[in-house]
Amino acid sequence: MTEQQSHIVTLDSLNLGEHVFDFQLSNDYFCQIENSELLGGEAHVHAELTLRERDFDLSMDVQGQVQVTCDRCLDAMDVEIDAYEDEWDWDEEPKKVDLSWLAYELIIVNLPLVHSHQDGGCNPEMDALLQNHLCTTLDEEQDI
């Protein structure tokens, strides 16, 4: 069984009541996802599922660090993740819940919109190239 499949919960197999799931998403997990902006990472997932007769509640807390590409220098950079969700919208009541995929989606929506290193953290060679191509205001007006 691959790591991606190991956190699929079949709701019919659970007893009514509360269930707790704690697991790690490893670097290998993130690398297996095609077309992802995540290059890798490590995250701890804590999920609490309360199953009732006709429905269920799910809350999930994800903490860790993931790697993304810096928008400025294109090198890999680490982003800390501390995300929590307890309101999920389901198109229909699922029979199975893929906790690892929900954790991945929670990470993605909690990434900053712009991925860039702190000042001075970018690749120095790329930073020098970018400085050569920056648009700056001219001290003197030029005739066009």
Image (cartoon, rainbow, N blue to C red):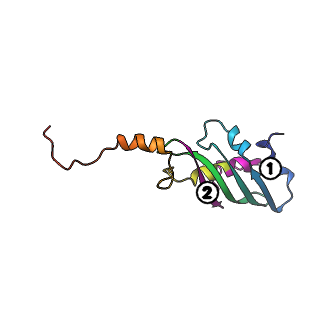
Q: Position of residue 131 (x, y in %)?
A: 38, 44
Residue located beneath label 2 in the image = 80
- Of 134 and 23, nearer the camera is 134
Q: Residue at x 72, y 43 (%)?
A: 29
Bounds of the magenta segment: 75-103
The answer to which image quadrant residue 55 occupies is bottom right
- Of 128 and 136, nearer the camera is 128
Question: What amino acid is at disc 1?
Answer: Val
Q: Quadrant of the C terminus?
A: top left
- Give the secondary structure at mark 2: strand
Question: What amino acid is at disc 2?
Answer: Glu
Q: Position of residue 57 (x, y in %)?
A: 72, 60
Residue located beneath label 1 in the image = 9
Circle 1: is it few (<14), some (14-19), or many (20+) Cα within 10 Å?
some
- The residue at the far left in this view is 143
Q: Position of residue 66 (x, y in %)?
A: 64, 50
Q: What separation in Å lies between label 2 and label 1 (alpha carbons)?
A: 27 Å
- The residue at the far bottom in this view is 18
Q: Assess whether residue 101 is covered by the magenta stretch.
A: yes
